[in-house]
Image (tube, coloured by chain):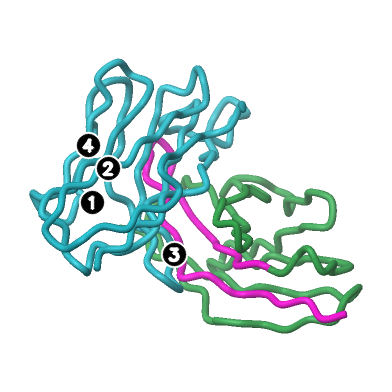
Chain colours: A cyan, B green
Amino acid sequence: GAGVSQTPSNKVTEKGKYVELRCDPISGHTALYWYRQSLGQGPEFLIYFQGTGAADDSGLPNDRFFAVRPEGSVSTLKIQRTERGDSAVYLCASSLAPGGLAGGSTGELFFGEGSRLTVL
Amino acid sequence: AQKITQTQPGMFVQEKEAVTLDCTYDTSDPSYGLFWYKQPSSGEMIFLIYQGSYDQQNATEGRYSLNFQKARKSANLVISASQLGDSAMYFCAMRIINDYKLSFGAGTTVTVRA
């Protein structure tokens, strides 16, 4: 499809395990974002990539969380030693414009359907 | 830092009626954009409408319109002629110009009754 693709859609794991969540953005979108959404809440920013580099990882809650985007397209969010509090939906989004609302572009983010992580 | 406030956790609306979802925001930056997203039970965030801080007119997209009151820092979404398929969670979001981070409110759940 032409949209943002996230896998797996659902992941159930045990406390202490390692998890990888994958995001395949819309082709040509240089900006990629990870957000985390807890039940009944709005999405919270985790990390932003412009190309291959993480331009802003200030939203990552601690050093158990890490994300990569080695070729500037697909990104993987990695969570080590998972905890029950990590349970949430992890949303990936991409956009053409990393910032700036000029030039007729709203710079809106296009989201995937998310990866629901449950840590038992 | 930007802050988005949505004070209505849930709303019920009768089919074919209009509903207004409140959103207020706080920023010291004069240049920003406001967004509304719809999130149905499937989980995907669907972009609905955008309003720039310098736009002179309120944005409209089909049955969606944005009641933008800059002085009050509010950007309420109006959904006209509600349909059953409009039942979803709705998020207001903001980004300042030349920034990349989109900040979201807590959302409002809309339930359309037949």
SS type, badge 2: strand
Start and end of the magenta stretch?
A: B88-114
Q: Nearer the viewer, mark 3 or mark 4?
A: 4
Q: Amino acid at mark 4?
A: Ala
Contact, mark 1 vs mark 4 (Cβ under 8 Å): no
Q: Is residue A8 left or right of residue B114?
A: left
The N terminus of chain A - image quarter: top right
| Depicted A2 relative to depicted B101: above or below | above
Contact, mark 3 vs mark 4 (Cβ under 8 Å): no
Chain holding disc 1: A
Q: Is residue A77 left or right of residue B54?
A: left
Kindly report the distance in space between the C-alpha atoms of the residues bearing marks 1 and 3.
14 Å
Of the residues under marks 1 and 2, which one precedes in the sequence?
Answer: 2
Identify residue for label 2: A47
Q: Amino acid at mark 3?
A: Gly
Of the residues under marks 1 and 4, which one precedes in the sequence?
Answer: 1
Q: Give me the residue at 52% from left, 74% from top.
A: B6
Q: Amino acid at mark 2?
A: Ile
Of the residues under marks 2 and 3, which one precedes in the sequence?
Answer: 3
- Say the numbered circle drawn on residue A59: 1
- Say the numbered circle drawn on residue A48: none
Chain holding disc 3: A
Image coords of residue A103 (percent x, y): 58, 25
Kindly report the distance in space between the C-alpha atoms of the residues bearing marks 1 and 2.
6 Å
Q: Give me the residue at 35% from left, 62% from top.
A: A88
Indicate whether residue A101 is drawn in magenta: no
Image coords of residue B54 (percent x, y): 59, 45
Identify residue for label 4: A67
Kindly report the distance in space between the C-alpha atoms of the residues bearing marks 4 and 2.
8 Å
SS type, badge 3: loop
Q: Nearer the viewer, mark 4 or mark 2?
A: 4
- Say the numbered circle drawn on residue A42: 3
